[in-house]
Image (tube, helix red, strand yellow):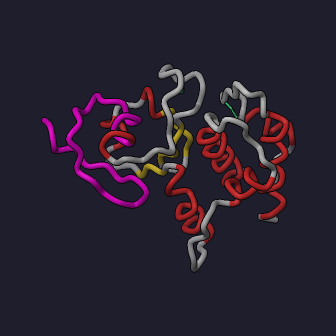
């Protein structure tokens, strides 16, 4: 059944060649050349491969591509447009406020974890626009940073929430 599956990624519908059980992450990187989601553990443990599926954070390394048929996938590349749609903005900003805040706070070092951190934070702020520090810590709990950037990540999320106030 190759070539029959269609998926919606960053608001574009594409027919893909991969078999239905192929991990979504492989399709995003190999077929769609989207480099935001990254391969880390491949076991749903680190969060580096996270994407939004219908606005919910999902680990694309363990999600068969067939599971997102009929749903809307957003990667880091599509986050500004996703935000603009959500907020009914007339213009798509260059960056999602969380992306801007991560830059402003210099929140990451090697940058490997930042895709998942930003995707998760965007999901959090879409549901809880003014989270407490405890809510931020809970939401980010499943994202590993080998560089230990957690304090600056929390500050960046607080900054993004403040900017949206
Ligand atoms: S690569 Fe998917 S959670 Fe680590
Ligand atoms: S900044 Fe290096 S893994 Fe997080």
Asked whether, in this view, residue 73 is left or right of residue 19, the answer is: right
The residue that appears at 53% across and 26% down in the rendered structure is: 40
Image label count? 0
Residue at the extreme front of the image, as rendered:
110
Asked whether, in this view, residue 71 is left or right of residue 50, the answer is: left
On the rendered image, what quadrant is the C terminus found in? bottom right
Residue 42 image point, x, y percent: 47, 22
Q: Nearer the viewer, residue 27 or 140?
A: 27
Residue 19 image point, x, y percent: 22, 32
- Residue 13, located in which quarter of the rendered image? bottom left
For residue 163, above or below residue 24: below
The residue that appears at 45% across and 34% down in the rendered structure is: 60
Magenta-colored span: 1-28
Asked whether, in this view, residue 122 is left or right of residue 53, the answer is: right
Asked whether, in this view, residue 124 is left or right of residue 22, the answer is: right
Q: Nearer the viewer, residue 58 or 95?
A: 95
In the rendered structure, does residue 152 fall within the stretch colored magenta? no
The residue that appears at 58% across and 21% down in the rendered structure is: 45
Residue 36 image point, x, y percent: 51, 45
Residue 65 image point, x, y percent: 33, 36
Residue at the extreme bottom of the image, as rendered:
90
The residue that appears at 46% across and 44% down in the rendered structure is: 35
On the rendered image, what quadrant is the N terminus found in? top left
């Amino acid at each position: 059944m190759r070539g029959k599956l269609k998926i919606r990624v960053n608001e574009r519908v594409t027919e893909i060649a991969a078999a239905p059980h192929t991990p979504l992450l492989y399709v995003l990187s190999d077929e769609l050349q989207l480099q935001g989601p990254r391969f880390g553990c491949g076991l749903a443990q680190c969060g580096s491969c996270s994407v939004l599926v219908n606005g919910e954070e999902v680990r694309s390394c363990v999600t068969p591509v067939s599971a997102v048929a009929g749903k809307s996938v957003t990667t880091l590349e599509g986050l500004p447009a996703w935000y603009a749609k959500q907020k009914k903005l007339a213009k798509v900003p260059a960056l999602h406020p969380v992306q801007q805040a991560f830059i402003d706070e210099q929140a990451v070092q090697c940058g490997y974890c930042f895709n998942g951190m930003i995707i998760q934070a965007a999901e959090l702020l879409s549901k809880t626009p003014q989270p407490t520090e405890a809510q931020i810590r809970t939401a980010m709990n499943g994202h590993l940073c080998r560089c230990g950037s957690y304090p600056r990540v929390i500050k960046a999320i607080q900054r993004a929430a403040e900017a949206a106030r």
